[in-house]
Image (spheres, rainbow, N blue to C red):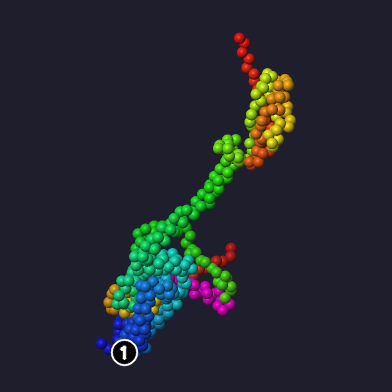
Amino acid sequence: MSCENEQQLISSLLDRRVTGEEWENAVAHVASCLTCTVAYESMQSLRTDVRGLDRAPVPEDLQASLRVLASHERVRRLSRVSMAARTQRWMDGVHLWFENLMRPMALPFAGGVLSALLLFAMWVPSMAGPRNLHGDVPVPIFTDPSLGRLNPVNEGGDVVVTLLIDERGRVTDYQITGGEPSPELTNMILFSKWTPATLFGQPTWGTVVFHRYEIKVKG
Amino acid sequence: MATTILDLSGERVAETSADSEDLRLVEGLRTGAERSYEELLSRFQQPVYTLALRLLNDQAEASDVVQEVFLKVFRNIGSFRGQSTLKTWIYRITVNEAHNARRWFFRHRGREVELDNEPEETRNWKETIPDKSRSPFDIAVDRERQVMMEAALERINPIFREAVVLRDVTDLSYEEIAEILGISLGTVKSRILRGREALREELAGSLKTRPALRLVPKTAE
């Protein structure tokens, strides 16, 4: 065997990919040829070095990515088993999409609803007036006293009176803030009938300002 | 044809059991069995990553290739007919993907200039504990040798590199390499031989002694 043939065989010799006859010839040649011995040992050393290259471990992030990938692909494969599974997967996808869409808006939305409710609750009492339809007991928080029946004897000029009405509709005190006191005014106060003020529908004390203007026509 | 040195009878028994194991694994993957997916990853993620890394010599590229490989495996497991072993099939996909990645790299990223040439090294707490078994010199020599070997591997023709890596790093037989690369046994032999020779030449070039510092004695003035 020539050195050239031997050089061609060295690689196969290392991998034991030669026939028995080739093996015997090659071994005999290597034993007698220094050049081929050096070439053989050099190639053997090279092969050992290549085999000894570090096996770099799989990075942890790649391992995690592969697990996620496997999980997704498994679900995808399972979903293709039947129409029901495919529909279920589609529904899950829509559900997840909707959840992901709504989740960022959940807090602002809840805050908006609560704020609206709070503002509405604050605004409602101001809507309640002293209206009393069909004779119902007035239920707003507070209603002022009102004049039920005025004394028919109604004379004495212009006057403005602040009256204090008790829970039974009687005048307990009064103060004349405009005009002059007169017996007619006193009679009017004594014989007029008042509806008492109410708090949450219950009669209570209250004040009312009474005006009376006399119109005089000169003829 | 004369007898070969390898004892094939033992290998055939091992191949038969491997085949049945492969078929069971493939069936599990087709039916969506969770354990099969885990088994596939635990069996192949390390060798596929090692192969991709040795073919591309770039961690990020290798990671991308590994993901592509497993995606293709999961998606196309239905078309696996069992005409080759599962290992051969997956390695063939890996080699093809690495080939595509290399082509893409040369087309798109060849002109890019890296700002940070050093690969990012992540160290965990175990690696910070000093290793008392080997001297820093030995470690440095080994590291240097490894770096030279990787550089030499990267410089040789990719066609020869594929053959050498599949044979010496992945430890596949010539028949398996022929199946993966889609070439004849003779071509496999030739590529491995030429790859090893090219590697030896590259290493010989990088190991050439450099001229030592020449000191010229001068008389004191």
Q: Please name whichever residue, A111 or B81, is drawn nearer the observer in this view of the structure.
A: A111
Q: Is residue B38 above or below residue A34?
A: above
Amino acid type shown at disc 1: Gly
Q: Which residues are magenta?
A: B132-156
* Residue placed under numbered mark 1 in the picture: A20
Q: Estimate the x, y position of residue B183 in percent, counting from the top left.
A: 28, 74
In this rendering, would B143 be left or right of B27?
right
Question: Which residue is at a point 48% across and 64% down the rendered structure image?
Answer: B119
Does A32 lie within the magenta span?
no
Q: Please name whichever residue, A84 or B21, is drawn nearer the observer in this view of the structure.
A: A84
Task: Name the magenta segment's main secondary structure.
Answer: helix
Residue at the left extreme of this rendering: B1
Q: Does dot 1 land on a helix, a strand or a loop?
A: helix
> Is residue A106 at all visible to an observer of this figure?
yes
The quadrant where residue B41 appears: bottom left
Other-residue count near label 1 (Cα within 10 Å), few / some / many at <14 / 14–19 / ≥20: some
Q: Is residue A2 above or below residue B143?
A: below
- Judging from the image, mark 1 belongs to the subunit labelled A
Question: Which residue is at a point 35% across and 59% down the rendered structure image?
Answer: B107
Question: Which residue is at a point 71% across and 28% down the rendered structure image?
Answer: A190
Q: Estimate the x, y position of residue B65 in percent, counting from the top left.
A: 39, 66
Q: Is residue B91 above or below residue A201?
A: below
In this rendering, would B184 be left or right of A102?
left
Does B141 lie within the magenta span?
yes
> Is residue B202 at all visible to an observer of this figure?
no
Question: Which residue is at a point 74% across and 30% down the rendered structure image?
Answer: A173
Q: Estimate the x, y position of residue B209 in percent, counting from the top left.
A: 45, 72
Q: Estimate the x, y position of residue A72 in percent, counting from the top left.
A: 41, 66
Residue at the top extreme of this rendering: A219
Q: Please name whichever residue, A136 or B116, is drawn nearer the observer in this view of the structure.
A: A136
The quadrant where residue B68 appears: bottom left
